Amino acid sequence: MSIAVIINPVSGRARGAPAPDRVSLARAVAGQCGEPAEVVVTERPGHARELAAALAARVRLVIAWGGDGTVNEVASALAFGPVPLGIVPSGSGNGLARELGIPRDPAAALRRAMTAAPMAADLGEVGGRLFINVAGIGIDAYVARAFSAPGHSRGPLGYLRLGAQALISYAPAEYVICADGERFEARAVLVVFANSAQYGNGARIAPGARLDDGELDLVVVEERSRLATICRTPHLFRGTVSRIPGWSTRRFRRASVEAAEPMLFHVDGEPLRGGTLLHARVHPQAIGICR
């Protein structure tokens, strides 16, 4: 059987190779590995999901070459099936790829995906949408919506700039949270469902999260002191996020979050509008990842 490589031509466009070069490289590496390859390029949001669903019927592996959103689309199409996922990271954050130790060099990442044995990984679900890395309600969804707006500059610096602005202006909300039967209330700036440990760029919001433990990590950052939160944000990048005031975590299989107003949330960086009640759950060993 052949493999498939799905390329998002606009991911990492500020520093990445143009689409024809990516196509040529994918075919060259596949040839070096002795693999027949179908290489396709996405044309619009959601197209990677459509392509992966169609290709999964005739290939042994689907590789997503793009950012976290492209990886989410491909993973969602492959979920609960026998065809594993490979990743060539070229986005702004690349949280999952960083956590898995996947090389940033495209040729090395392609070779790794084509030759590695798949690991069984969990998937998360919130608001009826699957995610493979991190989903959240609150300030991260607020930043994700701003980052995805047309005309906004891409890349890590653009994301960090929006995050800094949000830390000053974002207003926390009151939530009622239930995790595996444990109910509590929180006035929070952030409610995170983490399958993996980091957003990307080394920002580790859930240091204990693991892709293969059959659970998700629920992280809540309650509003204590906005100034203290701002000053201690660098702990995200130092592996000491627990020092941020109001940070707490617990593992769960099923959870719900309720608020007085409809909630903005994100799945792997894609912003979505939900209702006043959102349900989250884990799907253990729902996908294979070749890393």
Image: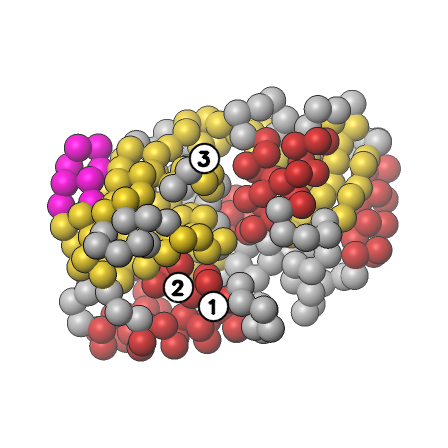
Q: Amino acid at mark 2?
A: Tyr
Q: Earlier in the sequence, mark 2 or mark 3?
A: 3
Q: Earlier in the sequence, mark 1 or mark 3?
A: 3
Identify the residue position indicated by label 1 in the image: 146
Question: What stretch of residues is rendered in magenta?
Answer: 177-184
Coordinates of residue 261 in the picture (x, y in percent): 26, 56
Q: Please name the predominant secondary structure of the magenta segment in the image.
A: strand
Q: Are marks 2 and 1 in contact (CB under 8 Å)?
A: yes
- Give the CA distance from mark 1 to mark 3: 25 Å
Coordinates of residue 260 in the picture (x, y in percent): 21, 54
- Give the CA distance from mark 2 to mark 1: 6 Å
The residue at the point 34 percent across, 34 percent down is 281
Q: Are marks 1 and 3 in contact (CB under 8 Å)?
A: no
| Lateral position of residue 44 relative to residue 284, left or right | right
206 in relation to 154, above or below: above
Coordinates of residue 56 in the picture (x, y in percent): 68, 28
The nearer-to-camera label among 1 and 3 is 1
91 in relation to 196, above or below: below
Identify the residue position indicated by label 3 in the image: 123
Q: Quadrant of the C terminus?
A: top right
Q: Residues within 10 Å of mark 3 (few under 14, many from 20)?
A: many
